[in-house]
Amino acid sequence: MHRYLVALQLSLCLFPLVSSYTWSFTTTPQQCATLSLQISGSGSPPYSVLVIPYGPTPLPNNTEVRTIVYQQFSGSSTTTSFQLKYPSTSQFVAVVSDSTGFGSGGTSVAASVMSSSDSSCFNPNTTVMPDFPFNIYPTNQVVQCNASRLWWDPTQVEGTPSFQGVIPGGQSFSIPEGQVTQVSNQGTGFSWIPSVREGSTLIVVAGDDRGLGTGGSGLYTVSQGIYPNSSCLTTASPSSTTGSPAGGTYPTNASGAETTGGTSSSSKTNVGAIVGGVIGGLAALVILALAGFYFIRRKTAANVTKERPVDLLQGDPEDDRDSAPNDLGNYYRPEPFLATEPTETSSMYGREEGRAGTVTSGSRFGTSDRRQSALGSFSDMRSATPDYEMGITGGTTIPSSSRKYPMQRQLRPVNIIQHDDAGAADEQAEGQPDTVELPPAYTNIRKPNTT
């Protein structure tokens, strides 16, 4: 809680309350011409104006002829005039104050000096110097909420030095002076924690009992630092864009373009921000569209792979083995039809019934009764290729003594079905043998003798 109270007190000290008065240039800034200002409203006199050179000098050889102008209004007067000893195309920033504090009237943006026929107010070959120089550590750096040391040579200062912070077009403030110490190689000075937002343009102005600005000025851009710290910032912490700049209407570039309250500068900034936002938005939309297209296509491809038909006869669809173009698979390969060898005559059944062996139940000739018995015998057989070596067919063995011919190849059983598609069978023909036409078995074809 104590830290926040200190920050609040510091902000009240640095930044005065809302001004009840305004000021404006009543003449156009010109080289070696008279510059006039006027106060409007109810301020607290006496008033003063601080004019600070801004930017590089336009003269050859980098000759700096501009000095800081500290002009006090006379008594309770609300107007003042002085000669502007600045070369044309150079720039400056003006800060107006009253008795309530530094910068209470506001700060202008960088104003440009217009040309004139008079150039007698300065020597373009001589560089001017401040009454005493000051330094800042770390060198040429101002870091947000990080301590900086302002120091000087006490032998060159008259009385007590003072420092001010000026933000063009924003708020200006007095830098509070801390405990003055002596540091080796850094002279006399004090530590200061800048409660200024990073990115702000800051002018540090030094003065002593001879007046504000006698120690010169330094131009810095507040940085965030390697380790960002914002603990010292408050809602009143200034930046380069805080509020509308003071000064009324005045030129801001060498061409004479004027601005009222920073309208021109603000317009340019807004256009750049809008263009950048539009380009960034379009780029984001394109990236999102490409990402969506990629994921949708990937999901669709995954679904097509999952829904691929499976051929149960051709094997596992995930099998990487490539089948031959004419490979029909095991279930599609044709098998030859092998029939039994016909017997000599149907009367053979009668002769073989008296033998000791059992007649093979695979004969295809005889009466219908025998055919039916043959069908019954086939039904008991296994549906598979016979065992050639054992001579077994359906569990029935033909003894070698009952064989009329050498042992023939045993064939798989074949069922013969007669379709009665011409009406009922003729009862008179039941006693007659049926004739079944079968294709040639080609069992009598012998292999050619290769010996």
Image (tube, rainbow, N blue to C red):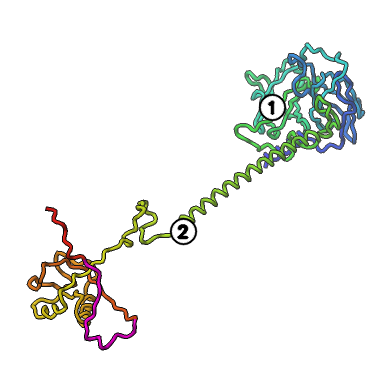
**Three-letter amino acid code at the position of disc 2:** Glu
Which quadrant holds the N terminus?
A: top right
Give the side of residue 393 with respect to residue 61, left or right.
left
> In terms of image quadrants, where is residue 32?
top right
Estimate the spatial distance between the alpha carbons at disc 1 and disc 2, rounded to whole Å. 81 Å
Closer to the N terminus: mark 1 or mark 2? 1
SS of the residue at dot 2? Answer: loop
**Residue in the picture at 32% in, 81% down:** 420
Residue 9 shows in this picture = no
Q: Is residue 429 magenta?
A: yes
Judged by depth in the image, the label closer to the viewer, 1 or 2, is 2
Given residues 28 and 327, the one toward you in this image is: 327
**What is the x, y in percent for residue 243?**
79, 37
Residue 273 counted in the magenta span: no
Which residue is drawn at the image coordinates 10% and 79% (left, top)? Answer: 351
Label annotation for residue 307? 2
Give coordinates of residue 372: x percent, y percent.
23, 80
**Residue at which label 1 appears:** 179
